[in-house]
Image: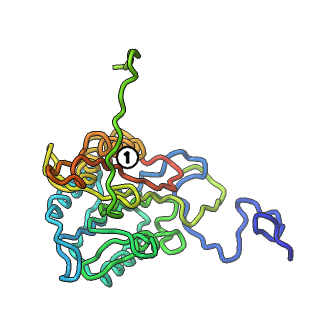
Amino acid sequence: MEKSKDGSDGKNLGCGTAIQDRPDAPMPVGRTDPDYNMRHKERGHALVLAYENFSSSGPPRRSCAEHDVHIVTKAFKKLNFVVTTHWDLRKEKFLATLKQESERDHSDHDCLAVVVMSHGGVNNNKEEFIWTYDNKVDTTELWKNFTPEKCPSLAGKPKLFFIQACRGENVDKGVRLQRPRGLQVQTDSLPIERDYAIPLYADMLMMWASYPGMFAFKSGNNGINGSVFLHFLSKVLTEDGDQHDLSSMLLRVTREVAIVYESYVPGNFDLDKNKQIPYTVSTLMRKVFFNPK
């Protein structure tokens, strides 16, 4: 049978029409709702995969790991997540832990959060990786098990991934924005729903500490005592978590990392006075509010 331009067989399939080989999953929110359903019994799991130590053939120790885990745990607990931390997992156990989480029943959960703290980089094929204790693992392994057909109890729910790791060895010296001369700047202080289908990679958000190819900094200055990205992420979630939607909060995180922070490594031109900006990829279709439970 001849295919139409959209790849179908030419039949007029309505939104509620079942398609062979398309799996089913429970509907947690109506098709036109602007916000995700955050009224389940529980907020959900926050899975923290933290690395401080590595094998002798791996990268150097991450001395800020304990502090990073502390502030992230505090922030996500305030948002009513159940936080589980795994330390220094080997690659096999790392992958098994993610798969095990995807196989849990999340029916009573609003969403899922995964936070990874490690070293990272780009391989010879330009593919990003993060380090486990004993080996590298492709970054896409973080979310590959959480698509709706593999984890139906999270279908239609936010799946949030926060990645603290370098994405290369390049640095960003930034640019100075100057006020135009002679220009004065003014400042001002679930009803019944028909079935519907969603893409497999919908409802995900991935936020990295830095732009692709760029270094991700840690600091001991200006009230920061660990990874810069996780410092501001935890700060904003703690301060604004019950007031603003997630997208607005992550805009603030991006802005504060980019503007407030500048590396301070006197005597090292390459690493001194550099800027950093988080990088977000999102297929979220609705707003996420962490309503009080």
Residue type for callout 1:
Leu
The one of 203 and 135 positioned closer to us in this rendering: 135
Q: Which residue is mark 1?
A: 250
Kindly state the secondary structure of the residue where label 1 is placed.
helix
Label 1 packing within 10 angstroms: few (<14), some (14-19), many (20+): some
Query: Is there any visible trace of residue 42 in the rendered image?
Result: no
The residue drawn where x is 53% and y is 51% is 285
Query: Quadrant of residue 123 in the image?
Result: bottom left
Question: Horizontally, is 143 left or right of 97 in the view?
Answer: right
The one of 114 and 103 positioned closer to us in this rendering: 114
Q: Position of residue 163 (x, y in %)?
A: 33, 62
The residue drawn where x is 46% and y is 56% is 281
Q: Is residue 3 above or below residue 197?
A: below
The residue drawn where x is 42% and y is 51% is 38
Q: Position of residue 219 (x, y in %)?
A: 17, 52
Query: Quadrant of residue 260 in the image?
Result: top left
Query: Is there any visible trace of residue 258 in the rendered image?
Result: yes
Question: Horizontally, is 250 left or right of 285 in the view?
Answer: left
Question: Horizontally, is 149 left or right of 96 in the view?
Answer: right
The one of 104 and 116 positioned closer to us in this rendering: 116
Quadrant into which the N terminus falls: bottom right
Q: Is residue 134 above or below residue 257?
A: below
Q: Position of residue 258 (x, y in %)?
A: 32, 44
* Number of numbered discs on residues: 1
The one of 36 and 159 positioned closer to us in this rendering: 159
Q: Is residue 175 above or below residue 152?
A: above
The residue drawn where x is 52% and y is 69% is 148
